[in-house]
Image (cartoon, rainbow, N blue to C red):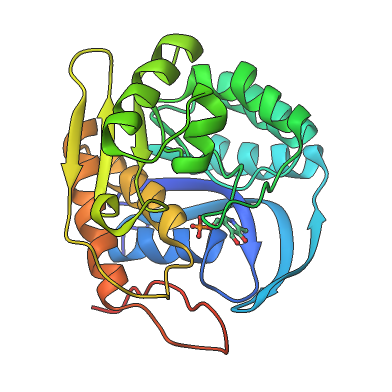
Amino acid sequence: MVDSKPLIPVALTIAGSDSGGGAGIQADLRTFAFHCVHGTSALTCVTAQNTLGVNRVDALSPEAVGEQISAVVEDIGVQATKTGMLLNAEIIEQVAREVERWDLQPLVVDPVMVSRTGAQLIDDRAIMTLRSRLFPRATVITPNRYEAEILSGLKIETVDQMCSAAQQIYDQLGIKAVLVKGGGLQPSCRGTDVWFDGHEVQTLHSEMIDTPHTHGTGCTLSAAIAANLARGEDLLSAIQQAKAYVTQALQFSLAIGRGQGPVGHFF
Ligand code: PLP
């Protein structure tokens, strides 16, 4: 008889659905699969979107989100968890309660507050709830440039400013580690992320890939970090390997649809 016990690590993504398949749950599950990690999911919302934009967002109830998490954890168990688009304060509160209840560690929190183009995706109350309830429970948070500006209160245009913001976020929010992503900055900073875990600020570099098809980059990075953590990597090497994965995903990005295509996972 075939032993059906999972011999591979299991990761959980708590995030939204992207009907275009480029970001959200779809990107996360694809990233987990690439890393030979079994992917489980708790859906927070359903977006109707394509490469041209988001037409509609429907939230699930906080209870439905909570029950998905419980169903996965109480039976299957997970070795690492990531959160993506959590949409509103009620869902964030519920997710924070489940993280506490099930001790979901390690936990990678992609804040998903502001898009890479600078549009705010969640309201101010949701941002406050993220700060007070979820960030303190994260192993690492991965804000983009705009999110780091909101969280630190600092303007970010240079790598030095990314470093100051990373330290500020760490000091103010009581987070274990922060990775500020340089993706939204001018080309010279684009392959550079800044990492701070209370010891030394480190800049992590990767090749800058010049493509308009970058949808799903943030989701893919945080999912790859979670996958590497589920496989037992330490945090910094999980991040370094995840960055290398995203660089490849950008190299193999997909020129599909009439707008901004997604990063690709076929390589
Ligand atoms: N999650 C969902 C459901 C989304 O629709 C989006 C963006 O549209 C994101 C996350 C963030 O995507 P990215 O990885 O491009 O930051």
* Count of marks overlaid on the render: 0
**Residue at image location 56% in from the left, 35% down from the top:** 74
Relative horizontal placement of residue 178, taking residue 258 as reference (left or right): left
Name the spot of residue 204 as percent of width and height, x first. Answer: 18, 41
Res 52 quadrant in image: bottom right
Res 150 quadrant in image: top right
Which residue is more in the foreground, 15 or 5?
Answer: 15
Q: Quadrant of the N terminus?
A: bottom left
Which residue is more in the foreground, 61 or 85?
Answer: 85
Q: Is residue 214 above or below residue 98?
A: below
Which residue is more in the foreground, 160 or 109?
Answer: 160
Relative horizontal placement of residue 243, taking residue 11 as reference (left or right): left
Q: Is residue 71 visible?
A: yes
Q: Is residue 214 above or below residue 223?
A: below
Ligand 1 visible in quadrant? bottom right
**Residue at image location 79% in from the left, 38% down from the top:** 62
Q: Quadrant of the C terminus?
A: bottom left
Name the spot of residue 99 as percent of width and height, x first. Answer: 57, 26
**Residue at image location 65% in from the left, 52% down from the top:** 119
Q: Is residue 202 above or below residue 230?
A: above
Name the spot of residue 126 as percent of width and height, x first. Answer: 73, 32
Q: Is residue 35 visible?
A: no
Name the spot of residue 190 as percent of width and height, x first. Answer: 29, 54
